Image (cartoon, rainbow, N blue to C red):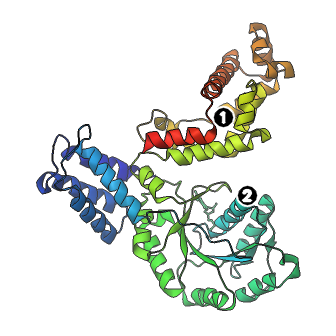
């Protein structure tokens, strides 16, 4: 993700290096190359020109401060510009009314149904609200089935009607059904089409005519580049929406749609979806996304994800773990949580491009955690509580018992010792998680 844009911008900066003042002449080649990088990454021409004009205006005539090179200056200006163009500030979803009704729209295949379930789970987990999903896609029976399966998986009720041919009636029947009278949030999954057609827009406008909708979210596949922007524009004119969700931001796409869509539609991006799993949903922060686009990494999101693991692990808070001696059971708890929140690559994607771990992006092998679990299962409870008991003889026995090599058992013990050292360092410095987060924030910006 964003590789093209990162590499090209990095290359363009070499033309400005070594200058003490930025002038119209010495910045020209850099700007030309940045423009090319943006256009090749599917940023719309209008947005691209806007970014270039702003960077030019802010950079020319600048006398550079000691220790800051012109290329660093330009990166900072581009970052600020990207942040502005993507909305500047995070935009909250509005869920304060009871009930709150959220309507999702978008073309077929963009990830609308998947997102409906993710959003339901996200609201339930973060706000402790009662959520119901409404399957109002009357044209694709498979979509209803898909929503039912997802609802079952995340334990959220799904309202649907067999053989109904009126989406508005489905929504009204659900809202008037006494079974759902105490629910806080309703999320409506509407029908998509391969292209925008009048029947579809009429159907959605009819729902909006009869039901007071609090949020209308336009779901956009970030892989579809310029088409995504054009479709969003048409949907905005024909139906109107209050926010945008960019899906498939985990894919190998150029990312330009994410940069141009707010500038083109004047509507905020509220969420991003970064994978097929139910946990792959994040609030959209323009600042963090600008850092990611430029390869500066999104360390804050990384830490927040890590905090989630800390919070959920075996019901122990970080504080509890720090109080006691970190043992093999705690270690396995973390490993299981890391596995359950998804791919390690996903986390590494948040790191700055030049971070030593980011080059592991393609090679990290999560099989190692399965192997750890197998080895762990061959240990006695006494060994798990006090791994120092595990001597050469026991390593041999554990290896024979679980079918892993002695080297693999030793690797796991070493990995455990390293984790324990990190935890002990945190303990020594008496940092709590929010202090750690603040420390990282300060170092980053
Ligand atoms: P809908 O037709 O708009 O309802 O789209 P679906 O929710 O059925 O999604 C279409 C396909 O995209 C499915 O295979 C999903 O698993 C997949 N999908 C949805 N969101 C994401 C995402 O953020 N990343 C990736 N890689 N795939 C996604």
Q: Residue furthest right?
A: 179
Q: Nearer the viewer, residue 348 or 83?
A: 83
Task: State the image coordinates of residue 55 (x, y, percent, origin top left).
Answer: 26, 59
Displayed quadrant of residue 208: bottom right
Q: Nearer the viewer, mark 1 or mark 2?
A: 2
Task: State the image coordinates of residue 1 (x, y, percent, origin top left).
Answer: 46, 52
The quadrant of the picture occupied by the C terminus is top left
Q: Nearer the viewer, residue 188 or 111?
A: 188
User: Residue, x 27% and y 67% (percent of image)?
Assistant: 49
Q: Secondary structure at mark 2?
A: helix
- Using the image, tell me which numbered label, if any, was put on residue 367: 1
Quadrant for ligand 1? bottom right
User: Residue, x 59% and y 69% (percent of image)?
Assistant: 109
- Using the image, tell me which numbered label, if any, was put on residue 125: 2
Displayed quadrant of residue 204: bottom right
Task: Classify 10 Å Cα crowding around label 2: few (below 14), some (14-19), many (20 and above).
Answer: few
Q: Nearer the viewer, residue 268 or 235?
A: 268
């Amino acid at each position: 993700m964003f590789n093209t844009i990162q590499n090209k911008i990095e290359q363009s900066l070499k033309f400005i290096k070594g200058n003490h003042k930025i002038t119209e002449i010495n910045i020209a080649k850099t700007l030309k190359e940045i423009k090319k990088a943006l256009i090749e990454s599917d940023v719309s021409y209008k947005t691209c020109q806007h970014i270039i004009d702003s960077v030019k205006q802010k950079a020319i005539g600048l006398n550079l401060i000691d220790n800051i090179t012109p290329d660093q200056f330009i990166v900072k200006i581009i970052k600020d510009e990207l942040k502005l163009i993507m909305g500047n500030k995070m935009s909250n979803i509005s869920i304060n009314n009871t009930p709150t009704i959220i309507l999702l729209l978008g073309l077929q295949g963009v990830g609308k149904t998947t997102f409906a379930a993710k959003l339901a789970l996200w609201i339930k987990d973060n706000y402790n609200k009662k959520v119901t999903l409404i399957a109002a896609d009357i044209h694709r029976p498979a979509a209803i089935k898909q929503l039912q399966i997802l609802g079952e998986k995340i334990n959220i009720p799904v309202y649907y009607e067999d053989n109904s041919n009126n989406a508005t009636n489905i929504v009204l029947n659900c809202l008037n059904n006494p079974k759902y009278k105490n629910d806080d949030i309703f999320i409506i999954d509407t029908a998509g089409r391969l292209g925008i057609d009048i029947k579809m827009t009429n159907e959605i406008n009819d729902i909006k005519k009869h039901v007071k909708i609090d949020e209308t979210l336009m779901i956009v596949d970030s892989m579809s580049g310029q088409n995504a922007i054009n479709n969003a524009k048409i949907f905005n004119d024909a139906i109107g929406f209050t926010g945008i969700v960019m899906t498939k931001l985990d894919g190998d796409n150029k990312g330009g749609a994410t940069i141009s869509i707010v500038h083109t539609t004047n509507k905020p991006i509220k969420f991003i979806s970064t994978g097929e799993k139910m946990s792959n949903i994040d609030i959209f922060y323009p600042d963090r996304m600008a850092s990611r686009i430029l390869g500066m990494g999104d360390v804050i999101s990384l830490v927040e994800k890590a905090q989630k693991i800390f919070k959920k692990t075996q019901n122990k808070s970080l504080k509890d773990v720090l109080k006691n001696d970190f043992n093999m059971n705690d270690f396995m708890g973390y490993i299981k949580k890391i596995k359950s929140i998804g791919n390690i690559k996903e986390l590494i994607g948040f790191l700055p491009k030049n971070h030593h771990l980011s080059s592991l992006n393609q090679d990290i092998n999560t099989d190692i955690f399965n192997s750890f679990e197998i080895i762990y299962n061959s240990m006695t409870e006494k060994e798990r509580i006090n791994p120092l008991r595990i001597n050469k003889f026991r390593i041999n026995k554990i290896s024979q018992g679980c079918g892993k090599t002695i080297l693999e058992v030793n690797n796991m013990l070493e990995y455990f010792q390293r984790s324990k050292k990190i935890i002990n360092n945190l303990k020594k410095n008496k940092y709590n998680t929010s202090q750690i987060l603040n420390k990282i924030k300060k170092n980053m910006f």
